[in-house]
Amino acid sequence: MTDSTLPVSAPTFDRHMIEALVCPVTHGPLHYDAAAQELVSRAAGLAFPIRSGIPIMLIDEARQIRADD
């Protein structure tokens, strides 16, 4: 396999970053959803996307979630 044919993996998220990040709305804890690549604030009912390994902590970019998500 040459360098040009090597599979490109998605950037990974540093899980230790969760310890430093809080929800911008509630200032409460966030939970990492690896499958959805999101940081979830259950208290605010919001899921913040992680793009290219970078958490996007903008309220306008967050997805509203249901309580049972």
Image (tube, rainbow, N blue to C red):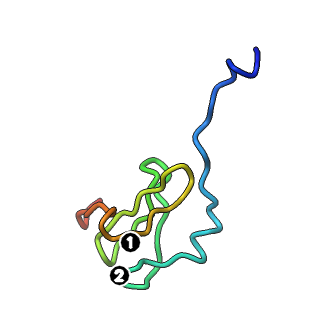
Q: Residue at (54%, 75%) from the top-left corner? A: 21
Question: Could you classify mark 2 by the number of other residues whose Cα lies within 10 Å: few (under 14), some (14-19), or many (20 or more)?
Answer: some
Question: In the figure, 1 relative to 10: above or below?
Answer: above
Q: Residue at (25%, 67%) from the top-left corner? A: 67
Q: Residue furthest top?
A: 1
Please give left or right for residue 22 compared with residue 10 in the image.
left
When asked about the image quadrant of residue 56, the answer is bottom left
Residue for badge 2: 25
Please give left or right for residue 33 compared with residue 16 in the image.
left
| 1 and 2 marks in contact (CB < 8 Å) | yes
Which residue is more in the foreground, 62 or 35?
A: 62
Which tag is nearer the camera, tag 1 or tag 2? 2
Q: Is label 2 in a helix, a strand or a loop?
A: loop
The kind of residue on which mark 2 rests is Val
The kind of residue on which mark 1 rests is Ser
Q: Sequence-wise, which precedes: disc 1 or disc 2?
A: 2
Question: In the figure, 25 relative to 39: above or below?
Answer: below
Please give left or right for residue 26 compared with residue 33 in the image.
left
Q: Is label 1 in a helix, a strand or a loop?
A: strand
When asked about the image quadrant of residue 15, the answer is bottom right
Q: Where is residue 26 in the image (x, y as percent from the top left)?
A: 37, 84
Rendered-image quadrant of the N terminus: top right
Q: Residue at (46%, 47%) from the top-left corner? A: 35
Q: Residue at (60%, 46%) from the top-left corner? A: 11
Q: Where is residue 14 in the image (x, y as percent from the top left)?
A: 64, 60
Question: In the figure, 45 relative to 8: above or below?
Answer: below
Question: Could you classify mark 1 by the number of other residues whose Cα lies within 10 Å: few (under 14), some (14-19), or many (20 or more)?
Answer: many
Residue for badge 1: 41
Q: Position of residue 34 (x, y in %)?
A: 50, 52
